[in-house]
Image (tube, rainbow, N blue to C red):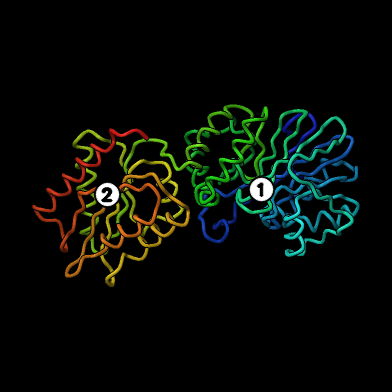
Amino acid sequence: MHCVRKVTDDLYWVGANDKRLHLFESIHPIEDGVSYNSYLLMDEKTVLFDTADWSVGRQFCENVEYVLNGKPLDIMVINHLEPDHAASINEIVLRYPDVKVVSTEKAWLLMNQFNFGVEEENFIMVKEGDTMKFGKHEVTFVAAPMVHWPEAMVTFDLTNGVLFSADAFGSFKSLDGALFADEVDFKDEWIDEARRYYTNIVGKYGPQVMALLKKASAIDIKMLCPLHGPVWRKDIPWLLDKYIHWATYTPEEKGVMIVYASMYGNTMNAAQILAAKLHEKGFHNVHMYDVAETHVSYLIGQAFKLSHIAILSVTYNLNVFPPMQNFIDDMKRLNMQKRVVGVVENGSWAPQAGTLICEELDEMKQMTVLNEQVSLLSAVNKMTADELDGLADSIIESMKQDY
């Protein structure tokens, strides 16, 4: 049975929600599921904007068929070829063999690599600045390379101000009947998942995102239609401001993320002491995470949000504790920068995790490592407790800088 929502007078959401998938891209936990958004325009020409993952292919195809109501599908615009949005292309082509597929040159190459079944005579190649008219509606195409694949583009409806934004402005979480961001408590219940989606999926490509945002600032956007998450028709400047922070690696707020690796509880004890010192001194935006218990995607999301990171790691086989190493490696891969970092190491006979962590931080851009580094020998003692107090002072003092 179909499940659709009207976006505007002649535009319909025909996507689907997946509540059964546990790992997005087989790596990121999604306890609340994810939506695969597709949009169908009913003009003189019928136009489908992107498809959906094959896991929800039956629902998606029923939705398209219902909205078409016996009409042919004339055009399919593909903004992004990643299979969670493009895997149903083949099925659409089989059901509507006369459909013309519109996308970029690189998208055509990927369509063939994925064997999506589009014949060359049915493919229309477009580039930035090209326009197409479907009747009342006229759209223009904007290149968005490496946001976050090289073939990506976005499509802007010049008639009603709708931007089909591909993976930009998307979010984890199933829509669960809602469609618009103003139908949910986005700022409290969705923002963390939107940030986690951006930072882990797109976060490496901040300069490319800023290039797209610069292009977007030149057009009069009335509505954002992303490929995941809710549609935006209100508060668009608020969301754009979040994206500017994320794309420029600028902290959203002054706060401390304490992430620790502890085998027997002693490094965790140091983390607890540091957190208590910060609160005692009047700073309360403190968040603590066990790196072995918290999936790295959540850690990355918080690292993008907060201005300060305290890394406390036990030494393991003369190296950094493996889950902590994974977190640091992910920060490097995603181009994390512009953070103030405090480092605490632990080891019973050869503590050197701190030195190794600092070497990795030195390879990252604009990362300020505080001088008050702490080295524990097995457990916190009176001297190292005082050093943790000094580290807390240093963190708070550095908060006086502008971010």
| Residue under the image location 75 percent in, 44 percent down | 49
Residue 36: assigned label: 1
Discs 1/2, front: 2
Q: Amino acid at mark 2?
A: Gly
The residue furthest left is 382
Q: How many badges with numbers are in the image?
A: 2
Q: Answer above or below: position of 320 versus 155.
A: below
| Residue under the image location 80 percent in, 38 percent down | 131
Residue that label 2 marks:
342
SS label for mark 1: strand
Image location (x, y in percent) of residue 385: 13, 50
Label 1 neighbourhood size at 10 Å, few (<14), some (14-19), many (20+)?
A: many
Q: Quadrant of residue 263?
A: bottom left
Q: Is residue 14 left or right of residue 370?
A: right
Q: Answer above or below: position of 81 versus 392.
A: below
Image location (x, y in percent) of residue 342: 27, 49
| Residue under the image location 36 percent in, 41 percent down | 307
How much space separates mark 1 and mark 2, taking CA atoms? 40 Å
Q: Amino acid at mark 1?
A: Tyr
Q: Name the residue nearer the viewer: 334 or 371.
A: 371
Residue 378: assigned label: none
| Residue under the image location 15 percent in, 63 percent down | 377
Label 2 neighbourhood size at 10 Å, few (<14), some (14-19), many (20+)?
A: many
Q: Name the residue nearer the viewer: 128 or 288.
A: 128
